[in-house]
Amino acid sequence: MARAAVFDVDGTLADTNHLHVVAWWEAFRQAGHRVTMHDIHRSVGLPGQDLVAHLLGDDRDTDQDATVDAAHKTLYATYFDRLPAFDQAGELLGALAAEGWRVVLATSAGGSELAALRRAIDADDAISATSSADDVAEGKPAPDPVEQALALADVPAENAVFVGDTVWDMQAASRAGVRAVGLLCGGIPRTALEAAGAADVFDDPADLLARIATGPFAGR
């Protein structure tokens, strides 16, 4: 029976969350807003304009939303040629593909950003499909990206595992009826991931790969 291994990318397979934090901090600063890096970090993983709304609130000048989002994209793009993958991230995807899992990426990234992330991970042979921000009406924590990933893999929710690093990932997977696995390498505490729906929590891709025979991908 077909099985799907669905992965978030930023903070899960690539060590990019803090690069996003710095880019968002500067984008907010340029627009005249003081937003702490701690608050930005907890919001990474939301689609761009949702993140702006989440951090600035309903009484913000919404005419600035697109400008702040665009500034973040421009600032973050300066890192594209040196985005770092987590240790053994590509090997994890390759091992799952070799065991017959359909590996699908479900990410808020799209376009050239997604292309840069895929270059960093260097596992294109293992990736069967990608659900990006360009493909869905709503991003995480809505279930749309995960449901799109399942449709691309042609696999029902009960035959899938989702791996991510944020509370938004865990909520999206849970709402899609998929087993949610959290990784700590994105910087979000274990308790927060578990409260958002994580059934299992591991340190990073290398930790998950080391337990591939006994963890959430075993016996499914």
Image (cartoon, helix red, strand yellow):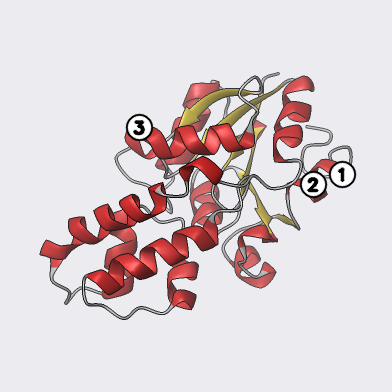
* Among the two numbered marks 3 and 2 on one chain, the one whose residue lies closer to the N terminus: 3
> SS at mark 3?
helix
Gap in Å between the C-alphas at discs 1 and 3? Answer: 33 Å
> SS at mark 1?
helix
Q: As rendered, which of 125 and 182 lies closer to the eye?
A: 125
Residue plotted at (67% across, 59% down)? 185
Gap in Å between the C-alphas at discs 3 and 2? Answer: 29 Å
Q: Amino acid at mark 2?
A: Ala
Circles 1 and 3, Cβ within 8 Å, touching? The answer is: no
Estimate the x, y position of residue 134 in percent, counting from the top left. 33, 35
Q: Amino acid at mark 1?
A: Ala
Instruction: Please give left or right for residue 55 compared with residue 39 in the image.
Output: left
User: Which residue, given by chain and number where applicable, does mark 3 sit on?
Assistant: 135
In the image, is residue 170 above or below residue 41?
A: above
Estimate the x, y position of residue 16 in percent, counting from the top left. 55, 54
Residue plotted at (44% across, 32% down)? 148
User: Which residue, given by chain and number where applicable, does mark 1 sit on?
Assistant: 210
User: Which residue, given by chain and number where applicable, does mark 2 sit on?
Assistant: 206
Estimate the x, y position of residue 208 in percent, counting from the top left. 79, 46
In the image, is residue 47 above or below residue 57?
A: above
For label 1, the crowd category at 10 Å Cα-Cα, with few meaning under 14, some 14 to 19 and many 20 or more, is few
Residue plotted at (48% across, 25% down)? 151
For label 2, the crowd category at 10 Å Cα-Cα, with few meaning under 14, some 14 to 19 and many 20 or more, is some
Circles 1 and 2, Cβ within 8 Å, touching? The answer is: yes
Q: Amino acid at mark 3?
A: Asp
